[in-house]
Image: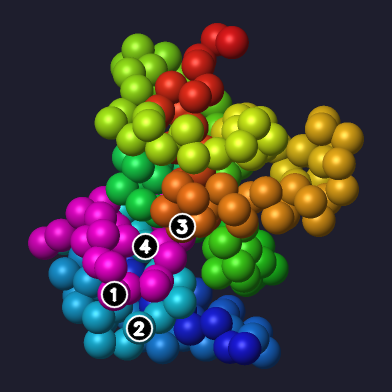
Amino acid sequence: MTIRVLIADDQTMIRESFAILLNAQPDIEVVGEAGDGEEAVRAVAELGPDVVLMDIRMPRLDGLEATRRITGDGDAAAKVLVLTTFDLDEYVYEALRAGASGFLLKTSSAHQLADAVRTVHEGGALLAPTVTRRLIQEFSRLGGKPAPRRERVGDLTERETQVLCLIAQGLSNLEIAGELVISEQTVKTHVSRILIKLGLRDRTQAAVFAYETGLVVVGE
């Protein structure tokens, strides 16, 4: 199946460069481009892409608000991959909270770019250790105040709760399998059930949920 991608960035050169790199992949097609957040939101509604490469700093409507509108639209299935210049960009954390599925450095190679699109499309995590640490730092600064969704954790089994906590710590399926002494396929099954029960889009959102609800407490 071909992955349909929309590129949103106010720099024409970046849009065109990414389009060339992605269109060279046999399983990826760039179906549109947007020069600002408003164009991105409109293009998602019109074109129905699977993945949106979203720059944060854009005119008229920035990438944060555009991400909120896209991921908040119940009819939109597009997943947002944030484009950033630095891996500790001050807006990365807010972008994840807004509904982004991960982030990608603009300096990434063609191989990394294509793999990132595939990973996000499949619902995998695209959260580097530096960003995981940033999430922890942010919740530490905010006092780790639980969000109103805390009661939804009760829908999880004990094993699913364990898996969710390990996801929040940035562990891969293979690492979680080793930690809990279960098969990797069993971990994948638990992850799928967690996302369904909590109404989350992917592993990245699951990690944010775990911190926001106080399930994972900073410092423990």
Left or right for 55, reference 131: left
What residue does disc 2 label? 48
What residue does disc 1 label? 75
In primary-sequence order, the first of circles 4 and 2 is 2
What residue does disc 3 label? 201
In primary-sequence order, the first of circles 1 and 3 is 1
Give how far apart the Cα atoms at labels 4 and 2 are.
15 Å
What residue does disc 4 label? 54
Q: How many residues crowd around disc 3 within 10 Å: few (fewer than 14), some, or many (20 or more)?
A: some
Coordinates of residue 114 in the picture (x, y in percent): 62, 71
- Magenta stretch contains residue 36: no
Coordinates of residue 201 in the picture (x, y in percent): 46, 57
Left or right for 178, reference 56: right
Amino acid, disc 2:
Gly
Front label number (3 vs 2): 3
Q: Which of 2 and 212 lies nearest the eye of the viewer?
A: 212
Q: Is residue 141 visible?
A: no
Q: How many residues crowd around disc 2 within 10 Å: few (fewer than 14), some, or many (20 or more)?
A: some
Q: Which of 48 and 181 lies nearest the eye of the viewer?
A: 181
Which range is magenta? 60-84
Give how far apart the Cα atoms at labels 1 and 3 are.
13 Å
Front label number (3 vs 4): 3
In primary-sequence order, the first of circles 2 and 1 is 2
Q: Residue at x 88, y 35 (%)?
A: 181
Coordinates of residue 82 in the picture (x, y in percent): 42, 56
Give how far apart the Cα atoms at labels 3 and 4 are.
17 Å
Q: Residue at x 87, y 48 (%)?
A: 183
Q: Is residue 30 visible?
A: yes
Residue 174 marker: none
User: SS class of the residue under badge 2?
Assistant: loop
